[in-house]
Structure formats: C-alpha cells, structure tokens
Image (tube, grey):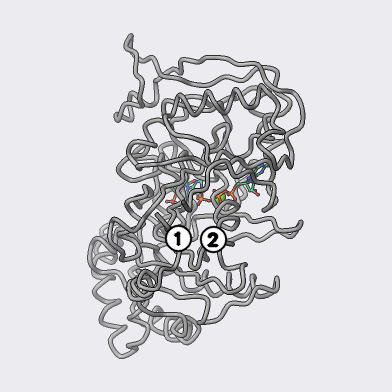
Amino acid sequence: MTNITIIGSQWGDEGKGKIVDWLASRADAVVRFQGGHNAGHTLVIDGKVYKLHLLPSGIVRPGKLSIIGNGVVIDPWALVAEIATLRGQGVEITPDNLLVSENAPMILPLHGAIDRAMEAARGAQKIGTTGRGIGPAYEDKIGRRVLRICDLAHPDTLKSKIENMLMHHNAILKGLGAPTLAAEEFVASLKEIAPQILPFAGSCWQALDQAKSSGKKILFEGAQGVMLDVDHGTYPFVTSSNTIAAQAAIGSGVGADQIGYVLGITKAYTTRVGSGPFPTELTDAIGETLGQRGHEFGTTTGRKRRCGWFDAAQVRQVVKVSGIHGIALTKLDVMDTLQEIKICIGYECRGKKYDYLPASADLQAEVKPIYEAMPGWQSSLQGVRKFADLPENALKYVRRLETLIGVPAAVISTSPEREDTILVKDPFQ
Ligand code: GDP
Ligand code: IMO
Ligand code: MG
C-alpha cells in the first residue's frame, strides 16, 4: 500500500491539516476530494501559521503536486483569494504545483446567499452551516444544472448554462415573492475571474493515472469528518458531501483500490461546531478547559467549538463505515491537566442500551452516554516526540482507546507544530 487517505473521524477539526502536511514530506501529491472552503486546516511550521480552506495541505511543501479534485465544490473567488494569501506568506503556487479539476462544480455567489437565507429561515432548527454555499452548490450539481470549472473556457455558452441553473432558482424566488436573478451579472463576473482559474484547470484523473503508472505516492486529504457525512453522519446536522474514505476515489477519479491506507484523524476528546446532537458534550468547567487549552475556535468562521469527552462508541462505528486502518490521535496534550478522564463506551435511550449511535435524529438527540473513567496523567505532553516519553497514564489512555475502537494509533500528535508528532506505525508501509 503506497497511498494514504486521511479523513476526520469525528465532527471535523481533528487536526487533519497538520497530519497531511507532516506526511506530505514523503508523498508526491496531495488531493482534496470533497467539501469546499467550509474546511479550515491549520498548519504550524516553525511557529509560522498557515490556514488552508480549499488548497490541499501539501501546498506549503515545495515540489509536491496539489490537486483539487472533481468532488470538491470550488468558489473561484475564494480560491483566487486563498492563493493570494498563501503567496503573501511566501508559498509558491503555479500551474506546476496546483491542478484544479476541470470537472469540479463551482460555487457562485447565489449559493452562499441561498445557504445563509435558508439558515435564517430555519431559525431554531438551523444546521449551523458555514454559510459558504456548500449545500446549495452540491444540490445544483446533483440537479445537473451547476457550472463547472471547464465551463469557464467557453464564454459563449456561459449565459445559457446560467439561465438553465437560474430556471430552478428563479421559480423558487418567484414563489417566495422575492426578486428573481438575471444571468448577465454572473456571466460578467465569471468572465472576469476565468483567466485567474483556467491556467490551473486540467484533468485530475489523468494526472492521478500518470502518478500511478510512475509509482508516485498520493495522499488523499479529506475535509470535515465522518460524523458530518451526508449518509453516515448525524443527519440532518451534516455537511452536503460524503466524507468517508470511499469518497476519495469518487472525488478524484481513481479506482477504489487506490485509496490505500485509511488514516482516521482522531482528536483525543471531541469537538463540534454548529448545531446537532453531541452526546458527550461538556457544558461545565472541564469543557471550558478543553476549549481554552485546545484553542477550540473555528478556522473558517471563528465560532467557538463545543467540547466533550472522547466518544469511543461513535469512533468505533466510524472506523467501520469508513474502513479506517489506523488513527492519528491528536491533541492529547490538551488533556494534560485533567485529574480524571471519561470515555463514552455506549449509550442509553428510552430504556434501551446501544453500542452504536442510532440513526434516528430523534434518538440521537436523547441518547445519554455510558462512561468509564480513567485517571489523568497530570504532566505535560506538549511537544513529546518519542513514544517512550509518554507518561504511563497517557499510554494507558491510548491503549484503552485502541481497544475500544478496534484499530491502532499509528500516529500521535502532541502540539500544533509539524514535527511534534510520534510515528508509531508507518501508514506508508
Ligand atoms: P482540521 O480541520 O482537521 O485540519 O483541524 P483544524 O486545523 O481546524 O483544527 C485543529 C487545531 O488544532 C489547529 O489549530 C491545529 O494547529 C491544532 N493541533 C493539531 N494537532 C494538535 C496537537 O496535537 N496538539 C495541539 N495542542 N494542537 C493541535
Ligand atoms: P474541517 O475540514 C468542522 C460543519 C458546520 C455545520 C455543518 C454543515 O476544517 O474539519 P456546511 O457549511 O458544510 O454546509 O455546514 O458542517 N462543518 C465543519 N465543522 N470542521 C469542518 O471542516 C467543517 N465543515 C463544515 O459547522 O455544522
Ligand atoms: Mg478545521
């Protein structure tokens, strides 16, 4: 197995960016395969912070090819702005190291507007989306009316394609008594942005096929997490894409056998941004401590992340639905000060016990976690780079999690810094 697929095993923000960047030193290409600029991946390299939303986390490493696959929804303006920010930080981005899939759908300004308007209309039922237009753009893709990157190369037919898309949206707007949209304004702004996107546009599947033929190593970089997967997550409080490892093949155009070792990036506790069920959520001082020590604020929206205990029942399920071979356990250092640590091993709901999270949103809202407790290690793990240097109770915690979720910790991360990472079992082998 030479390729690695990296996915989040919880509700996102597990530290995927850090681990992708770290592993990228030994890979040839990094490929994003779903989501869009709802993602926020933070890298810290020698104290310098890089925040990535659409660009793959391999972009900061010279000589590596970064690919935005067909499964990603691309806001061309957000992409151009992110490229400019990264260039401003000294990162070289050219058509030699960035390839944008020509068959990827585009997010247009109307998608963001619809996303935000729908959220406002939902009131207390809101999903807590990032407001980036992700859901509406994926809806248009499945509805076979979205514009794609390759359409930018054909300015003459842009207007009719947009009119086709607006036929759907204007029918709804009319029904709501709202003003309808005209294709012209979109045509003009797309023609303007096209020259900045088209130099990067190309065939992702062909690039990956060539990489395969020449024995190159590929990292597939997931965004969000499996509990946000539109099929397997806490529906309807999910994102609008499949976030499981299988999506790496679909969202980039490789065979299902190419996804390789599936590494589930897994936070040593749990966080969630936005609405939805969270059985192990801590609204007390311990939750506050985790949030403070872990700097749990969203990279994309700046929102405070909800914090709670590790949910082994949930991660065990995620391991199965996503075919995870091993995990990278991150942010263990954040738990340094805790006297006692709890782990959720199952749930209780309406007099019944569950060793998995039931699918019904009604039950998910009611499940009560069943916990077991362990003593904390109460010493600093920050920056530990050797497995042997982990205190005994930290080691016991890791071992217990491995037993409960059924797969080993291949990597352990002890700070945001790239090199503060322990390799336990090499996922490349
Ligand atoms: P992603 O969306 O999965 O890439 O994760 P984010 O970047 O949104 O959030 C993870 C945050 O935790 C970032 O600020 C990282 O710099 C930071 N981080 C990653 N690994 C560790 C770790 O092991 N310890 C600590 N303290 N912070 C970490
Ligand atoms: P990374 O890649 C955490 C959440 C939003 C909301 C739900 C739907 O950084 O881990 P959307 O805008 O996708 O329609 O919002 O999904 N969400 C994330 N939460 N990390 C992310 O990405 C997320 N991307 C979306 O908060 O609850
Ligand atoms: Mg994030």
Ligand 2 has an atom within 8 Å of the beta carbon of the residue at disc 2:
no
Q: Secondary structure at mark 2?
A: loop
| Foreground of the two, 309 or 82 | 309
Is 172 placed left or right of 137 in the picture?
left
Q: Nearer the viewer, residue 100 or 426?
A: 426
Q: Position of residue 118 (x, y in %)?
A: 39, 51
Q: Which residue is mark 1?
A: 36
**Disc 2/disc 1 C-alpha distance (Å):** 7 Å
| Place of residue 415 in the rendered image (x, y in percent of width and height, measured from the top left) | 69, 44
> Among all residues in the image, which is located at the extreme front?
429
**Label 1 neighbour load within 10 Å: few <14, some 14-19, many 20+:** many
Residue 406 placement: quadrant: top left
Q: Which residue is depicted at the point 59% across and 24% down? A: 397
Left or right of 380, for residue 41:
left
Q: Position of residue 248 (x, y in %)?
A: 36, 57
* Amino acid type, label 1: Gly
Q: Is residue 332 left or right of residue 6?
A: right
Residue at (62% x, 67% y) in the render: 60
Above or below, 246 relative to 125: below
Residue 290 is at least partly visible in this image: yes
Secondary element type, mark 1:
loop
Read off the residue under disc 2.
53
Marks counted in the figure total 2
Label 2, residues with CA under 10 Å away: few <14, some 14-19, many ≥20: many
Q: Is mark 1 within 8 Å of ligand 2?
A: yes
Pinpoint residue 150: horizontal percent, then vertical percent: 34, 80
* Residue depicted at x 38% and y 36%: 318
